[in-house]
Amino acid sequence: MLAGVINQGGLLRDFRLSLAGFIILLLVVGGVYILAMVSNGQLTISSNNQDWASFGAYFGGVLAPAAALLAGYLVYKSFKSNTYQQKLLVIREALGRLDQQLERNLDLPFNNGCFGEEYRGLPLRKVIYAVSNKELEPNQVFNDALLSLLHNISILSYSISVYLNLLEKFPTDETDTNWLKNLEHHYWIEKYSPVCRRMKGIVGKDAMEQKIKKHQLESFRVIFNGGYDL
């Protein structure tokens, strides 16, 4: 919806500029015709149908191609903006599904008995916080599970990074559209930054470097503000 608002604003600006250019062309063409009449000594409005036919043919011959070009340009701009917008919507829907899956993974019951029966069945998120707060000693089984989850999150973060770059390049004449990118980025930081920081702190930098590709680590740091120093 927000992208649609920006899209309409950019198209409206293009329409106003194109209309202004067409009006200027109309005035120039009319001025040239009037000057030609004056130079020929025709200072009165003609009652001859042939003169009016010539007048109409002149204006039509000059303005019709310009109007056709203007219409084609506006159709092209509209098609380009709509195509870009649809691309953004498809990507955002895919990110939304990944967002829901990540939420489910963090809320899944932790059924491994490596921390004893007291923590069996608790949401994974609570176990992560318990280990991060030194209430539990981490172990290799738990770290391996977190590394797999962090790998998936890093893939998601790279996809988010691509989406944010597309938002920044949205085809519009507006100069203040970065607010949409910043709003989207703020959503991901607020939602996942705390738990991502804790998971990263549990498994450690070396383990993440061995498991996750460098460009994914960079996107993890940027998108989730994970504090990961490369």
Image: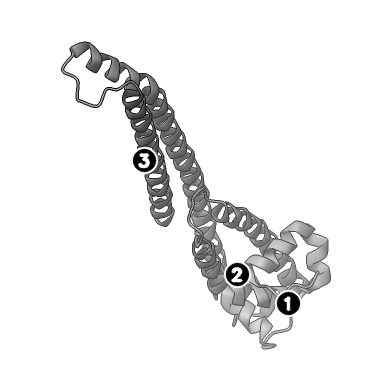
Type of colouring: one colour
If you read the primary sequence from the N terminus, does the residue marked by circle 1 or circle 2 appear first? 2
Q: Position of residue 209 (x, y in %)?
A: 81, 64
Q: Report how far apart the C-alphas of labels 1 and 3 lie in the structure.
A: 61 Å
Residue 4 higher or lower than 201, as above or below:
above
Q: Earlier in the sequence, mark 2 or mark 3?
A: 3
Residue 163 lies in quadrant: bottom right
Identify the residue shown where x is 44% and y is 53%.
Answer: 3
Point 57% across, 52% down: residue = 169
Mark 2 vs mark 3, foreground winner is 3
Marks 1 and 3: CB-CB under 8 Å? no
Q: Which residue is mark 2?
A: 111
Look at the numbered disc 2 and give the secondary structure of its residue.
loop
Cβ atoms under marks 2 and 3 closer than 8 Å: no
Q: Which residue is mark 3?
A: 19
The answer for how far apart the CA atoms under marks 1 and 2 are is: 19 Å
The percent position of residue 113, horizontal first and vertical second, equals 66, 74
Which quarter of the rendered picture does the N terminus lie within?
Answer: bottom left
Question: In the image, which is nearer the foreground, mark 1 or mark 3?
Answer: 3
Task: Judge the density around disc 1: few (<14), some (14-19), many (≥20) Cα neighbours within 10 Å.
Answer: many
**Outermost residue, left direction?**
47
60 or 161, nearer to the observer: 60
Query: Amino acid under label 2?
Result: Asn
Q: Nearer the viewer, residue 101 or 213?
A: 213
Left or right side of 3 for 223: right
Q: How many marks?
A: 3
Residue 23 horizontal/vertical position (percent): 35, 38
Residue at the disc numbered 1: 202
Question: Is residue 53 positioned above or below 132 on the image?
Answer: above
